Amino acid sequence: GINAEYGILQIPNTCWFSIHNVSKILPEHRNILKLFRRDKLLSETQTLLALLLIMEQKSPTSFFTPMFRTLPKQAPYPLFSPYAKNLQSACLTRWTQDFKSELESQLAHLHNTYSQSYPEYFSSGALSWEEYSNGIFHIHQRAFYVDHSDQKDDWVFIPFMDLFNHRLPPTDDHEVMNDVMWRFISMGEHHEGEELFVNYGETKSSIDFFMFYGFVFISNPIDCIRLSLTLLNNNNNNNNNNNNQ
């Protein structure tokens, strides 16, 4: 068993898969990252981290190979599941279509812009839709936000932390994470063989849980619905003004 207030697991930042660490360990990726940071289609931190993940997975001698072996070969991403079309939700369908179009545009941009300079990574033969979408999905599902004082990295991939399942609060256990160390601390007692949980985020709606993780709760106390509001055009505004006169 595990006693209360016992640090079960701690992982220092030197083992995290992050933009800073990969650039430090592999200087050859530094120039590619500089290009991507100036590229509007690829400059978001999660996209950069996914591209680094894809490049590093191609190296059999990568420092992060033990972590890569824990990843599923195909990310279980409900967004593009053939069953998603049965949701009967215009909002979800539009959101899915927009997100897929964005990824397809990024992939085409990589093929057209970077394949000649880095054919081993970004040619159409080296980077398929399945490989690119898997990299993106792994980061969306498994990376964690870290609040760095110098804004060095926003999202990091912490080995083995992604193997924890989610539980809605309250939970007896908690995570302590800063830009130096991630620790999982048991605040209650646990029996041998008992599963431990983390919280994937205390502000996620049921749509977030379903579309990004593939599950929902019967009762989600923080559930919400996104609304898209469109401004009326000038003609509609003029008609309303005339009606009010």
Image: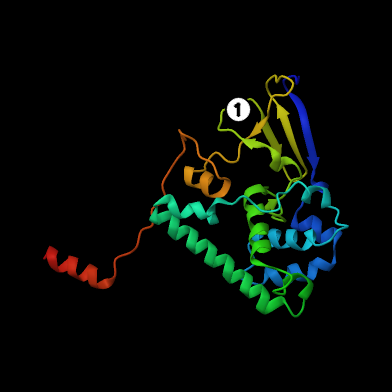
Where does residue 35 sit, x and y in percent of width and height?
A: 72, 72
Between residue 170 and residue 92, name the one nearer to us. 92
**Closer to us: 241 or 207:** 207
Give the left or right position of residue 238, taking residue 125 as reference: left
Camera-side residue: 62 or 8? 62
What's under tag 1, amino acid-wise? Thr
Question: Which residue was labeled with disc 1?
Answer: 171
Which residue extends farthest front?
82
Which quadrant of the rendered structure holds the C terminus?
bottom left
| Horizontal relation, residue 87 to residue 149: left or right | left
* Left or right: where 216 falls relative to 154: left
Task: From the top left corner, tell me how far across and down residue 76 is, in percent.
Answer: 62, 50
Quarter of the image with the N terminus in it:
top right
Is residue 46 visible in the rendered structure shown here?
no
* Side (left or right) of 72 relative to 27: left
From the viewer's side, name the closer residue of 216 and 16: 216
- Residue 165 position, x and y percent, is 64, 36
Disc 1 is placed on an element classified as loop
Identify the residue shown where x is 43% and y is 60%: 94
